[in-house]
Each structure stands twice: as structure tokens, then as C-alpha cells.
Image (cartoon, rainbow, N blue to C red):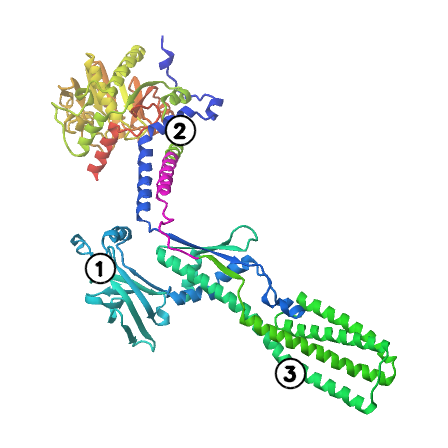
Amino acid sequence: MTSPHIANSQTPTTYPASQEEDEIDLGELVATVVDAKYVIILITLCFLALGVAKALLDTPIYKADTLLQIEDKSNALDALGSLTSLMESKTPALAEIEIIKSRLVLGTAIKNLNLNIIAEPKYFPIIGKAIARRFQKQNKTAEVASSMIGLDSYAWGGEVIRIDNLIVPKDWADQPLILIAGEQGRFSLWADDEQLIEGAVGKTINKSLAESLEKLTIFVSVLKARPGTEFIINKQSLSNSIDELNNNLIVTEKGKATGILSATLEDADPVLAAQTLNEVTKIYVKQNVEQKSKESQNTLEFLDKQLPLIKDQLEAATKALNDFRGNKGSINLDIETEAVLAGVVDVNTQLTVLQQKRDELRGRFTESHPVIIATDKQIARLKEQLKAINRKIELLPETQRVIVRLSSDVQVSTELYTTMLNNAQTLRVAKSGTIGNVRIIDEAVLSLKPIKPKKPLIVLVSFILGLMVGIAWVFIRKAMHTGIEDPDQIEKHLNIPVYATIPHSNEQAKLSAKLIKGIQPNEDQPFILALTHKEDLAIESLRSLRTTLHFAFLEAHNNIIMITGPSPGIGKTFVAINLAVVLADAGKKILLIDADLRKGLTHQSLGLARENGLSDLISNSISLEQAVRHIAAANIDFISTGSIPPNPSELLLHERFEQLLKILAKQYDHIIIDSPPILAVTDAGIIGRIASATLMVAKAGQHPLRELEQCTKRLAQSGVTMKGIVFNDLPENSSRYGAGYGYGKYVYRYNYQKAN
């Protein structure tokens, strides 16, 4: 009676997928992470090391800040009345922010502080600045240890340079120059390995360039460095300098509609950061005052142009009235006529003022501006009123009509002239005392602590990021790796029994590594794990396989076992050799045959030569006694591949091969044949038809389910019944996944290296 666990099946079957397969197995996820813990730790440590390096190597950045207030107050010219009401303006905070960051303000600050002259020491790449900062604290005179010989051109701490004036040709803007410090305050300036000028600290150096009419001018006020130290000099274009300063300058309004502006500037030099920010705010406040004064000046200039004209009109109107009265004599006006005269004077005065306002506004706004349109409507309304009054005047006697017109001209001119004269005087007083509506609340001060880099945060983030990347890498690799990791999946999906699961053996890896290094065994001390480490867990698994095979052979028609596998490098030869030794230890007479007539290397582990083997025996070149060699240390017999034939498959199909196996089967308890991979060549199908039991070795985590299905199908097509599968090279402490080191991996790698 055959056990259902080892039942044979020609046609693989597939079980229906259960709902549990669609569910997340938390235990499996944890096991996956635990199995790959060393990979995760390694990735985390790498990220942590990068984070620590970044925290130590990044240049410290300091922040200077200042506080400004935009006062919401009326313009100082409020005393001008209606004439100057349109001069009052309330600029929004956003507009003031844009003014602060404008080219007008930033460009002036850059010119005042020479911020577009970049002069800094040349540091060793990547780590140079960090080393210089360390030396800076102890190395005030820029002395460098003698261990830096050969790197003298780099700055190592304590170097100082300040250039107060640098004029270069226009096409040299943003092009770096090299300044090399010399003895006793001297220096030389270089460009493209060509020396341009030589000079000394505290002296202005001028040189006319041969290729252009422009001059090169430089004035170095401070230079402290070892002779030979190089500095990188650059005259930035004004636009690039403004953009760079603009990127580092942040201006925001604190709160909403508070009128309080906060300005911050970040820089690697804390002194320069505070100095630059104070200069920017000073220039901003100054231009604010100048703008207010300019408004008063423009209005005053307009009034000064109008006053002479109004005065001439007043004189002409007075003369005309006096002449008329001189001709007609004294004329008394009745109450109604005086009321008409007062109305004419009032309307004409307002109309003249509005027309002057419009002339002033026309210089600032277009015809379609709402202010111009509103003024035009007022003028039109006053003109309608004036027409109505004129109609009343037409009803008066002629003498009174003339008196009304002449008197209205005099009174309008007098009132307008007096008003404008007073306004002009008020403007002169206001202009002399003009103050802006911006004041500095807090000036920028020197910052002692850097705001960047935030070392604890960088280290923490790098650790967390490394941990996340490590775990993500493990799951991505697992998702991309379709190899079967659990032997239960083989039995479940293929309905093929797994006879044994062999754990990874570190000792076998050491034996295989010796073959890679070219260390050759001998017959007395072959590289066989079952001999060198009999208590290894892998050998214990093979002993379990031995027991399973005992029951499997109860109904077998011969005693021949074929060991094969889907592909090279899965430990097929390791299983064949050590299974033979384990069976021999049980008192069986065992013959091991290397039937891989293409790349078989079993003889190397046994310390034997390839010659006089199976291919020679099949071709009848040697006798059976010459082909069979006894391995005394393992107590087994062995037949090597023999000479590599040009037609291995045809040779195995020869009837003499089957006849030889029948003869040998009567002389041994078991014959173990190490065959070539199933998917690589057809040899396994040829040998498997003769063998009574075929075992396929599968390596943990390497074979997709489709590959094993294809192997089973190919053997079935050749008429070979697979007894079971040996699941090889499971990682230690895991039944799911691992990167083991199967014997076949080393043997085939060695073979390819030797062949090439």
C-alpha cells in the first residue's frame, strides 16, 4: 500500500485559491522583516552615516532679523485741505514688502557693502570647509600642521581676505579668478593659469588689458593666510547678486493688517548677515522719506507755476473793475444782485480749483482713471450751476451785469490767489519737516547660534528614512522575487510531495569556497560534508530523506535514483554526493554516477580526475573495472563523466548505456545518478526513463511556480515519473526565505570560470 504522502502523479493539479490567500498575513510580514534584519540594519546604518556626515559637513547658517512698522497716519500735508487730499496714500503691506525686495533697495545695499565682490578661501573638496571650521577655533593665525604637505594651496582654517574694490571687464563678470597669497602681504591674481597682476595689501593695483580697452583694478585691504594659499575671487553681476540676496531675504507681515513687517536674512557669516540686513532697512527707510518729500516738492512746483498766472489774472480783473467804475461812477448793487454775485464767485472759485486739481492729476493718471472721471463729473456739475447763474445775470440791467462780471472776476482771483499762496507756504513748511511713515523697531543683531544644520533632526530623519528604505527594499525585493520560499506551496499547487527540506550549511559553503579558490581535495580527504561534519543539520535532513526513500522503493522496479533540478546552481550535486554517503553509512553498497556529460564536476569534490568515465564506458573505450573507482573514505563507488563528448544526448540514448545500468543495478543496492538540469538539456528525460525514482532538487526562493510546473511537464512528456522534490538551502532560523549557498552554485561557477 502506497502512502498518500508519496503518491505519484503524472499530471500536476492546482488547488483553488482560498480567501486566506487574499488576506494580509501579519506573521509572514514580521517573519520577512526578521529574516532580512541584517539587510535592514545595514541600509539603516548607511543612511545614518550619511546623515551624521551631512550634519558635520554642512556649513552653519546664521539668521539675522529685524522688525519694521508701517504707520497708518495721515500725510503731513493734510493742512492743505481739499487741494492735497488726493496726495494722501495708504500703501498696503504687500506693496511695502515688494519695495524692500526691489532692485532699488537691494541693488543700493549691494553697492554700498560690495556684496557683489565674492572672495573666499579655496577649500579641499567636500570636507575642506568642515576641517577649516575645526581649525578656526584653535588656529587664529592660519597655521596648518605639517601633515598637510602637498595640500598647501587649500585653506585649512584662519584665513581672512577682504577686497574693497574690484573692477573687471564686463565679459569677466561671474567668472572666477584665483588669488594666491605670497610673502609679507603680497599676492598675485591668476586667470586660466595665466598671471594677471601682482600686488600688495593696502595698495590699489591697476592694469590695462591688452585684449580690451578696459582696466583691471583691485584693492585688497585685508589678507591673512599662509604663502601659497589660494582664494577664489569673483565679481558678480549686479543682477545675479540681487537675485542671490533676494532668495535669502524673507519679508513677511506679522499678523493681518498690523503694519508690522518682519525681515530675516540667512547667511554663513553672522556679521555680514546683520550688517546687510541693517543696510537694507536703512535704505528702505531713507527712500520712504525721500518719496514723501518728493510728493511735497512736486505739488509745490505746480503751485509756483500757477501763482504768477493767478496774480496776473487778479491784477487784470482789478484794473478792469476800477476802469469801469471810473467811467460810470459809483454804482450801488441791490440785495438780489449781491446774492447773484456771491453765487458766481463761489462757483467760479470751486470750478477753478477743480480744474487745477485735474491738471495735476492728469500728470499721474490716465483719462480713464476713476479719480479723473469723478473730477470731470464735479466740473460738469459746477458748469451747469454757473450757466443757471449766468441766466439770472442776463435778466439784470446792463450796468449791473457788467459790474457783477467784473466784481466776480476780482473776487474769484483774489480768493484763489490767497488760498494758493497759503498752500504754497504750508507746503514749504511741510517739506522741510517731512518724515516717512516707516520706522525701525528692532535692528538686526549678531546671531551667536546657527539655525542650520539642525544636527539632531538630520540624524533622526536619516535614521528613520534608512529604516523605512530598508524595510521597503525588503518588501520590494520580496514582491519582485517570485521564487517559492515555502515548500508547502509546492505540495499544495503541484500535488508533488516534498521528501526533504535541507537547511543552509555554512560548513558546506566553506568547502565549496575552497573549490573556487582552486584548492583540490584528494581521495583520502574528499570535500564531502557527510564526512567532515556528520552532525550538520543538512546531513540530518538527508538521513530523513534516506528513510523516506526506503519506503518509496518498496514498489520500485529497480534501485536506480536520478537526482536532477530545474537549473544549475541549486545544490543538485551536493544532494547526490552526500545522499550516496548517507546511504553507504547505513550499510548499503552505493554507486554514484556523474551523468552530466557537458559540465559535470562531481569528480573535483572527490579528488579524482574526469578521464575514464561514463562517456568512455558507453563508447566501449574502457572496461567497467576501469571506469568504477572506489572512494574508501566515503565507502562508495564512483563513475565520472569521462571525456566530454560532442553529442551527449545521442550517447545517453545508446542502448549500451541502459545495458550498463542493468548490469550495475545487480551489483549495488542503490545507483545514484547526478543528471544535467531539466530545463537546460534533454538528458534528464533520457536518464529518468531508466531510473525507478526521480528526485528534483529545488532551491529555496529561486524557482517560480511556473518553472517547477514546466519541469514536471517536461519530465512527464519524456515518460518520467517524479517521486518527489528535495527543497534545498533553506536559510537558518527561517522556513520561508534566504540567500543560501548551494553546492551546485559553486561547482558550476567554478566550471564556467575554468572554461573561460
For residue 308, which numbered disc appears in the image? 3
Q: Label 1: which residue?
A: 153
Circle nearer the N terminus (1, 3): 1
* Location of residue 616 by image quarter: top left
Q: Indicate which label's residue lies in the foreground, 1 or 2.
A: 1
Front in this rendered view, residue 740 or 450: 450
Percent coordinates x, y for residue 537 in the rendering: 25, 19
Vertical placement of residue 166 versus 592, above or below: below
Circle nearer the N terminus (2, 3): 3
Q: Residues within 10 Å of mark 2 (few under 14, many from 20)?
A: few
| Dot 1 amino acid type | Ser
Vertical placement of residue 40 versus 361, above or below: above
| Dot 3 amino acid type | Pro
**Is residue 462 highlighted in magenta?**
yes
Q: Label 2: which residue?
A: 706
Q: How many marks?
A: 3
| Chain part drawn in magenta | 443-472
Which residue is rendered at x = 16% and y = 52% of the image?
147
Front in this rendered view, residue 464 or 540: 464
Residue 265 visible: yes
